Image (cartoon, coloured by chain):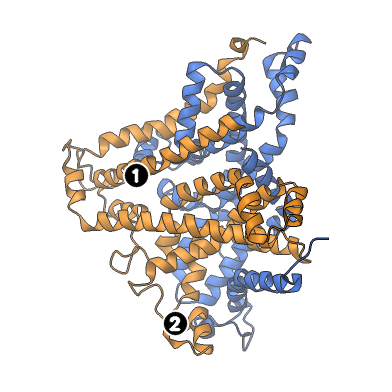
Chain colours: A blue, B orange
């Protein structure tokens, strides 16, 4: 046993106090989402003097809500697929084949990890390609922005997959596509989970991309719907908070179920990468 | 197996998307930053360095530049300090350890825009719970208009972002702590090393990889800050919280595309200059692995 000069109970108390700092803001919006227009504007922590459930009714009557969720879901799913496939295929040959061209490609991706996107020329480019405002344009935007991170993480990880496996597979008459699909992909699945989580969190929560690239309000993601809703309803905070609760609850529930994988995934990915 | 047999075309989908949608806009951005591209004008005219000349005479750019650097430096430093402290705390054998870890990471999965709106209510000068709290404690000198007072606005935005991202750093540090063999710290404590000495000579050096990742991500992320500032202060009061992206947004909405692109180019240069040393540090770490 280690000797301790501090009491574990004291540390526990300290940690709980700090955790309250995280929880109180969430409690604040939760409790105020049940208050009427006047009481909710006070942003207090007390219970509502009368519980107003109609705030939620109003929120669920918004057509934009469901559409926003649908758009966010669609975009996140498609970007996850494209980033995982494109990045893992590229990382595989970057790590295995090397050479001047692929070294250059790798360096370009690492630069892309650091430098910011030029958003206004991106809008212009989408316009020139006649895909401005489409799902395709926003999927391509996110894929381009998130590829560097995924390639960086995957190249680091593929190093740990022994080359002997490739050799054995090729000797058995396996083509490179089968090698990649049947052997490499399953072996790097843990990092692909990490990549997927980071991609989903980035796409789902992003405001910047769709704010600039999506003009058509039927294609707005849920975060843009929040922006729009707050602008419209900023006089009634009860309804605004109800909208926020409805928007963040699914995210928190998914987080609750997946938090082990999220935290383990980031753990494995970040220190290894 | 021969390296050259691996199919080069496996890299093509990623290369094409990245080239087309990341590198191309950057390059055409260089061109547009030398034009008077304006949403209200019919034609785009090449005007050489005019945008940049105008920018360098603009006090607002200087403010955005300084604020972005202050924000990035403060967030990188504090996020790591708080994240590391939380990681050390939650690496102890606490009963609620897993629950607490989960709670601290929670803000990271919420959209920064939503967090901005929540904190706008929290910092409300009269009703916000921050001022209510200080009022209750009788600490009236701490009751401030956090977002509208030029003395505090930037500080307030920084603290809000720390609230959001400290849990992320914590997780990366916790990962690093797991790789430190228990017997190493134990033998050090048997040798009579106290907590601080153990931390300095055993734990901290072994945390170096987690440290690199955290500093890198914090620096890159914080220089590109947008939503939190936009929602909390819109760059104000005055231009005291103006950062590059809020400045770009404002010039963008007034239709001055060429000018806004020039601001973006300056951010590009700034981030690259700050990022390259970190890049080199990363490369060095790769060799060690």
Give the side of residue B105 with respect to residue A142, left or right.
right
Rendered position, B98 above or below B29: below
User: Residue A129 appears at what percent x and percent y?
Assistant: 39, 32
Residue A50 lies in what quarter of the image? bottom right
Residue B67 lies in what quarter of the image? bottom left
Quarter of the image with the C terminus of chain B is top right
Quarter of the image with the N terminus of chain B is top right
Q: Nearer the viewer, residue B247 or B156?
A: B156
Image point (61%, 12%), residue name: B3
Image point (71%, 38%), residue name: A190
Which numbered circle lies on residue B142?
2
Is there any visible trace of residue A118 in the rendered image? no
Rendered position, B254 above or below B3: below
Which numbered circle lies on residue B21?
none
Marked residue nearer the N-terminal end (1 or 2): 2
Q: Nearer the viewer, residue B85 or B3?
A: B85
User: Residue B250 appears at what percent x and percent y?
Assistant: 30, 56
């Amino acid at each position: 046993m280690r000797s301790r000069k501090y009491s574990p109970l004291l540390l526990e108390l300290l940690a709980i106090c700090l955790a309250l700092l995280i929880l109180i803001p969430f409690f604040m919006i939760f409790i105020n989402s049940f208050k009427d227009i006047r009481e909710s504007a006070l942003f207090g922590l007390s219970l509502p003097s009368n519980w107003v459930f109609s705030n939620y009714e109003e929120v669920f009557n918004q057509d934009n809500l469901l559409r926003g969720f649908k758009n966010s879901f669609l975009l996140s799913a498609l970007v996850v697929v494209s980033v995982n496939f494109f990045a893992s295929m590229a990382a595989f040959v970057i790590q295995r084949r090397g050479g001047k061209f692929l070294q250059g490609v790798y360096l370009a991706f690492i630069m892309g990890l650091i430098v910011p996107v030029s958003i206004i020329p991106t809008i212009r480019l989408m316009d020139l390609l006649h895909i401005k405002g489409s799902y395709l344009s926003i999927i391509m935007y996110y894929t381009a922005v998130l590829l560097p991170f995924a390639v960086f993480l995957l190249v680091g990880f593929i190093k740990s997959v022994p080359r002997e496996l490739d050799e054995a597979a090729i000797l058995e008459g396996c083509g490179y596509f089968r090698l990649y699909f049947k052997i490499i992909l399953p072996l790097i699945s843990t990092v692909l989970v990490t990549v997927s989580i980071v991609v989903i969190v980035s796409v789902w929560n992003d405001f910047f991309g769709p704010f600039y690239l999506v003009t058509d309000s039927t294609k707005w993601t849920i975060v843009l719907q929040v922006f729009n809703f707050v602008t419209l309803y900023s006089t009634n905070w009860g309804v605004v908070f109800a909208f926020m609760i409805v928007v963040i609850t699914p995210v928190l529930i998914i987080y609750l179920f997946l938090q082990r994988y999220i935290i383990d995934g980031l753990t494995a990915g970040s220190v290894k990468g | 197996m021969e390296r050259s047999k691996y199919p080069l075309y496996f890299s093509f989908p990623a290369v094409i998307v990245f080239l087309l949608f990341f590198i191309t806009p950057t390059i055409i951005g260089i061109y547009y930053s030398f034009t008077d591209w304006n949403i209200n004008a019919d034609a785009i005219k090449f005007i050489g360095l005019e945008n940049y000349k105008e920018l360098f005479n603009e006090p607002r750019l200087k403010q955005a530049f300084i604020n972005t650097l202050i924000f990035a430096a403060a967030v990188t430093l504090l996020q790591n300090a708080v994240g590391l402290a939380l990681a050390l705390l939650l690496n102890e054998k606490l009963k609620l350890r897993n629950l607490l870890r989960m709670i601290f990471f929670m803000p990271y999965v919420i959209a920064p825009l939503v967090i901005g709106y929540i904190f706008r209510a929290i910092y409300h000068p009269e009703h916000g719970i921050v001022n209510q709290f200080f009022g209750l404690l009788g600490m009236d000198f701490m009751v401030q208009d956090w977002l509208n007072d030029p003395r505090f606005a930037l500080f307030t935005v920084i603290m809000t972002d720390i609230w959001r991202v400290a849990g992320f750093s914590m997780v990366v540090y916790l990962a690093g702590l797991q790789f430190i063999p228990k017997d190493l710290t134990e033998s050090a404590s048997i040798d009579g090393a106290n907590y601080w000495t153990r931390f300095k000579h055993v734990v901290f050096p072994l945390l170096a990889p987690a440290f690199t990742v955290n500093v890198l991500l914090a620096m890159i992320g914080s220089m590109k800050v947008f939503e939190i500032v936009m929602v909390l202060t819109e760059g104000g009061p005055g231009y005291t919280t103006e950062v590059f992206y809020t400045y770009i947004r404002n010039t963008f909405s007034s239709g001055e595309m060429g000018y806004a692109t020039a601001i973006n180019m300056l951010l590009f240069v700034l981030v690259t200059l700050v990022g390259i040393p970190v890049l080199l540090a990363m490369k060095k770490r790769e060799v060690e692995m």
